[in-house]
Image (cartoon, rainbow, N blue to C red):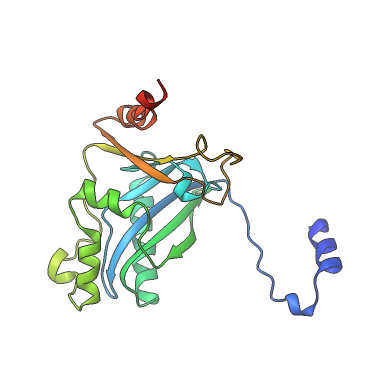
């Protein structure tokens, strides 16, 4: 607090206000991709990040079904998502990133666009999210398609999304992960077990290095 007061008094003017102060919570990050018609929502899956919050979501590994979330926390995620969708009166597809810190769910950010996990979720759920989002934009209600289903049943297999980096090809790139995204792609790995999916995610390009 003393450092903040010193910085504010020396570096800021009246034109600098209002000041937005972020708090870093070293918690667990989860994210959902959502289709909404402005009244109803549909969440195909919840992704739980393996790294703690602070690493850009595009650079983090993520797994679905989530491996450590309680049923009550999953219901709270769905509830928050539905309330956000209704209050911003949004139609189409959007992404929400949450942080769970000390058993409390916080909204990290809401992105009114498709995220990098949309193709993955579409593949593993069999639900074409972009096609469904387009229908809502053209006036089709989710009620007529999903009949009050807010979230799809969890798969009986694990899917891991892992980032792909081009550090070996791009000289001078710092390999340390930070809030800014550095990955240039991703790979998905599926298995009946979490260990199997993680193994595939790490070894998918082993032949390229041999």
Give coordinates of residue 15: x percent, y percent: 75, 79
Residue at the outermost top position: 210
Q: Quadrant of the C terminus?
A: top left
Give coordinates of residue 156: x percent, y percent: 21, 38
Quadrant in the rendering for residue 61: top left
Asked if residue 9 lies left or right of residue 60, the reply is: right
In depth, the one of 158 and 178 nearer the eye is 178
Asked if residue 68 lies left or right of residue 10, the reply is: left
Q: Residue at the location (20% across, 58% down)?
A: 128
Compared to 132, does 86 lie above or below?
Answer: below
Asked if residue 29 lies left or right of residue 146, the reply is: right
In depth, the one of 98 and 76 nearer the eye is 98
Compared to 205, does 83 lie above or below?
Answer: below
Q: Residue at the location (82% across, 56% down)?
A: 3
Q: Quadrant of the N terminus?
A: bottom right
Give coordinates of residue 162: x percent, y percent: 39, 39
Compared to 168, does 84 lie above or below?
Answer: below
Quadrant in the rendering for residue 4: bottom right
Q: Residue at the location (69% across, 76% down)?
A: 18
In depth, the one of 173 and 40 nearer the eye is 173
Q: Residue at the location (28% across, 69% down)?
A: 36
């Amino acid at each position: 607090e003393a450092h903040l007061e010193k910085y504010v008094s020396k570096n800021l003017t009246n034109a600098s206000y209002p000041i937005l102060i972020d708090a870093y919570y070293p918690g667990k990050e989860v994210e959902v991709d959502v289709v909404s018609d402005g009244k109803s929502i549909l969440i195909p899956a919840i992704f739980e990040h393996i790294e703690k919050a602070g690493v850009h979501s595009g650079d983090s590994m993520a797994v679905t079904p989530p491996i450590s979330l309680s049923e009550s926390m999953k219901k709270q995620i769905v509830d928050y998502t539905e309330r956000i969708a209704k209050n911003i009166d949004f139609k189409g597809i959007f992404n929400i990133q949450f942080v769970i810190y000390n058993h409390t769910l916080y909204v990290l950010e809401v992105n009114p666009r498709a995220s990098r996990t949309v193709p993955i979720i579409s593949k593993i759920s069999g639900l074409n999210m972009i096609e469904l989002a387009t229908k809502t934009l053209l006036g089709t209600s989710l009620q007529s398609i999903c009949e009050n289903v807010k979230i799809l049943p969890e798969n009986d297999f694990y899917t891991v999304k892992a980032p792909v980096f081009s550090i070996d090809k791009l000289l001078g790139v710092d390999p340390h992960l930070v809030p800014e995204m550095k990955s240039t792609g991703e790979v998905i790995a599926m298995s009946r077990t979490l260990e199997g999916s993680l193994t595939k995610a790490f070894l998918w390009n082993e032949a390229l290095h041999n």
